[in-house]
Amino acid sequence: MHHCAETGLSYELKRSSRRRTLAIQINQHGLQVLAPLYLDQYTIQQFVVKKQLWIREHLAKRAPVPDHISRQRIPFLGQELILRQVRDSITAVTRDGDQLWVQISRRVREENLAATVRQRLERWLVEQAHSWFAGRIAFYSKAMQVAPQQLVIKGWQTKWGSCHANGTISLNWRLLLAPSWVGDYVVVHELAHLVHMNHSEKFWALVATYYPEHQQAKHWLKQHQTQLQLK
């Protein structure tokens, strides 16, 4: 196993007399670098450095989805809420500081308990998304001098937001499982589409004006997109 100090990545190096170019392979064994027999180690290391963003993105996709519910910790806008489950006369979700209480009615059968907890947590996150995103849209739309018409909360698996020509902004409640600065980026991104309905240089210049850290946020989402879900 080889280690690239500049990136912190470890990889298996496989050399071949038949190979003429460098290549990267990610499989069940992890990261592998395929190299010609004659190529020096420095050139191989620099290839890993050059490809590190692609490598990290694809390694993240292979990472197991954390079971937030079983570990009783729910990520929430960069914080962690401690999950408390109790049987009660009603079914409801309430937050008390850093604790998130999930009350499940005693009428819910034991075999349906896990599904009910997940369903109620998702419903609570959707409610929180409506409130939080409404505030962030109000803040950024005033700064950017744009006028969105409606906010819709979605539950896409890997899509984070959209902007319709009629002024409707749709945002993914799963972004509440990410740090708040990542959610802010998506808000600015979609509001910028009210000015430029494309991804032109002018569009990205507008995004950068109101959210200079947009590249870091894009990279964070690429690395963690498979992690932003309840399991």
Image (spheres, rainbow, N blue to C red):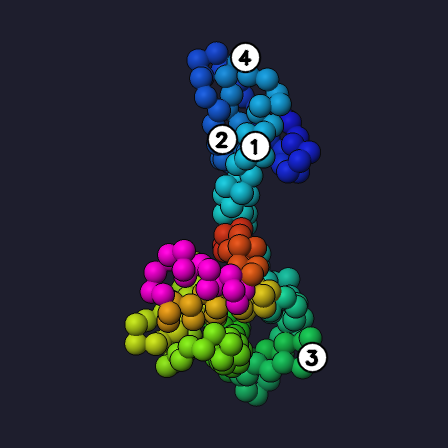
What kind of element bears circle 1? helix
The residue at which mark 3 appears reads as 97
Q: Position of residue 140 (x, y in %)?
A: 51, 75
Label 1 – label 4 distance at C-alpha: 17 Å
Q: Position of residue 2 (x, y in %)?
A: 64, 27
Could you tell me which residue is drawn at 49 percent across and 31 percent down? 24
Label 3 – label 1 distance at C-alpha: 44 Å
Marks 3 and 1, the one that precedes in the sequence: 1
The residue at which mark 1 appears reads as 48
Name the foreground residue: 183 vs 228. Answer: 183
Marks 3 and 4, the one that precedes in the sequence: 4
What kind of element bears circle 3? loop
The residue at which mark 2 appears reads as 24
Res 75 visible: no
Question: Magenta residues: mostly which secondary structure?
Answer: helix
For the residue carrying disc 2, how many other residues have a C-alpha within 10 Å: few (<14), some (14-19), or many (20+)?
Answer: some
On screen, 72 above or below 93?
above
For the residue carrying disc 1, how many other residues have a C-alpha within 10 Å: few (<14), some (14-19), or many (20+)?
Answer: many
Dot 3 amino acid type? Gly
Dot 1 amino acid type? Val
Marks 2 and 3, the one that precedes in the sequence: 2
Could you tell me which residue is drawn at 49 percent across and 35 percent down? 27
The residue at which mark 4 appears reads as 38
Marks 4 and 2, the one that precedes in the sequence: 2
Could you tell me which residue is drawn at 66 percent across and 68 percent down? 79
Q: Position of residue 153 (x, y in %)?
A: 42, 74
Determine whether label 2 and label 1 are within 8 Å by CB: yes
Dot 4 amino acid type? Tyr
On screen, 90 above or below 218?
below
**Segment colored magenta:** 196-211
